[in-house]
Structure formats: C-alpha cells, structure tokens
Image (spheres, rainbow, N blue to C red):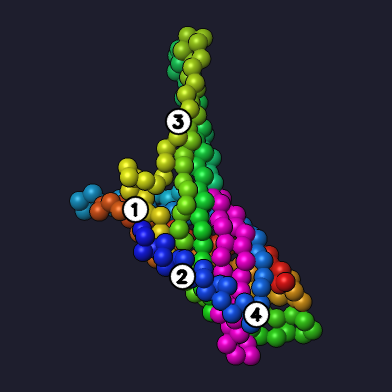
C-alpha cells in the first residue's frame, strides 16, 4: 500500500511542476460506477453487479507537446454512494432495512489528448489514458427496524469497506477514453472508464469497476 501511495504522491508532484507552462482548468461532473463481481466455486462462476452514483471535482493541467497534442495531469476527489432498502412482513413480525454505502476516492488521471480546431473559438478533443485511484474511505451503514407484537426495536451498524478484516483493495487503475468539446474557456466532456485491476484479494472472487462519466470544465 505504501508503494501505491508513493506512486500517486509522485504523480501529484508532477501536477505542480512547470506550472507556468501549463493550462489550468477546474472540473466537476457525474461519474456512476458499476462494480462487477465474479465468484468462482469449482467449475461454476456466478456474476453479480452493483451500481453506485458518483460525483467528482478537481483540477487539470494540460501541457502542450505540439500544436494539437498534449498530455493532461489531473487531481480530483470522487464521491460514490448507494442506498438500498428492503422489508419483511410476517404474521406477527414486520421490519425494514436500509443500507447506505459511501466511498471517497482520490484520482490522478494522466490523459493524452489531441485537439481539432473547429469554427471560431471551438475545438474538439479526443483523449485517452490511465487514471490511478486510491480509496481513502469506504463504509456501509445499516439501519434496521422490526416490530414484534406491537413492540418496535431498531439497530444501527457500520461496516468498513477497507481495513485488516476486509478483502477489498483500495488501489485501482482504470483506462479512460472520451471526447471533449470546448468553446472559449468552457469545456463539456464525457467518456468511459474500464478498471484494469482486481478490487478483491480473495482467490475465488474477482471484482472490477467500469462506468461512464460526464463533466463540465472551465480554463482559468
């Protein structure tokens, strides 16, 4: 884990090196994530998926390599969340459960980009590259209530996504690609990201991430 943190720290330092020659931009957007899990038992593989809403905000420095070619280094925070509800009803028992999962990640995208000038101040840019992600926080809060013969009881429990008792991995690398339309200093961009690493350390469990993203940006 220390090695992963060192990689991200070195990349973050690169964001601020040569600041004078970089184009600074700020970004916000929506980035839902789909976690696909395959559990293997003998010759049988069972696949399940879980979707979370995601939101991000951050900064980008775009360095020009040539007239239309550049490489953009970014640093952004991402917040993922999912809420699930369930209920049970019996002859003398009724109950409900609500679970809320929250996750906070730090992303460092490194995207090669090529721009084509359009009419006026507009440009169309294609980009692709890796994003290095580290989960700094993850938790599932479960609230349960049950009614037995007219008497209601409630319970609140938290389950950490990461730590010594968890098989979830904090570090991920995703391959991202997409398009960006820019007019003057305003940018609209979108694309797709595909996880390259297994997010579960269990031998018989493989979890990968994927998802679309859509964002707005402004060059300072």
Please give the label number shown on residue 200: 1
Q: Is residue 76 left or right of residue 194?
A: right
Q: Main secondary structure of the magenta part?
A: strand
- Say which element carries label 4: helix
What separation in Å lies between label 2 and label 3 (alpha carbons)? 37 Å
Q: CA distance from mark 2 to mark 4?
A: 19 Å
Q: Which residue is mark 3?
A: 157
Please give the name of the residue rendered at 36% of the width and 64% of the height, measured from the top-left corner: 3
For residue 79, above or below residue 98: below
Callouts 2 and 3 close, C-beta under 8 Å: no
Outermost residue, top side = 149
Helix, strand or loop at label 3? It is strand
Q: Nearer the viewer, mark 2 or mark 1?
A: 2
Residue named by callout 2: 10
Q: Nearer the viewer, mark 2 or mark 3?
A: 2
Residue that badge 4 annotates: 20
- Position of 39 with respect to 173 (left or right) is left
Q: Which range of residues does the magenta coloring cover? A: 51-80
The residue located at (20%, 51%) in the rendering is 42
């Amino acid at each position: 884990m220390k090695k992963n943190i060192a990689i991200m720290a070195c990349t973050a330092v690169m964001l601020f090196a040569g600041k004078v020659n970089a184009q600074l931009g700020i970004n916000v957007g929506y980035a839902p994530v789909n976690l696909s899990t395959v559990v293997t038992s003998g010759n049988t593989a069972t696949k399940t998926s879980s979707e979370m809403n995601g939101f991000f905000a951050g900064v980008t420095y775009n360095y020009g390599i040539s007239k239309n070619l550049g490489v953009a280094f970014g640093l952004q925070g991402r917040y993922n969340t999912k809420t699930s509800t369930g209920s049970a009803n019996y002859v003398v028992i009724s109950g409900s459960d609500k679970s809320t999962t929250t996750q906070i990640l730090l992303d460092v995208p490194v995207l090669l980009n090529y721009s084509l000038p359009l009419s006026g101040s507009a440009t169309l840019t294609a980009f692709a590259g890796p994003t290095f992600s580290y989960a700094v926080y993850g938790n599932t809060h479960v609230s349960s209530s049950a009614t037995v013969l007219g008497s209601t009881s409630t319970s609140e429990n938290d389950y950490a996504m990461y730590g010594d008792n968890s098989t979830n991995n904090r570090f991920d690398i995703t391959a991202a690609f997409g398009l960006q339309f820019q007019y003057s200093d305003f940018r609209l961009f979108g694309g797709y990201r595909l996880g390259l690493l297994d997010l579960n350390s269990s031998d018989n469990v493989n979890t990968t991430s994927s998802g679309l993203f859509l964002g707005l940006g402004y060059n300072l």
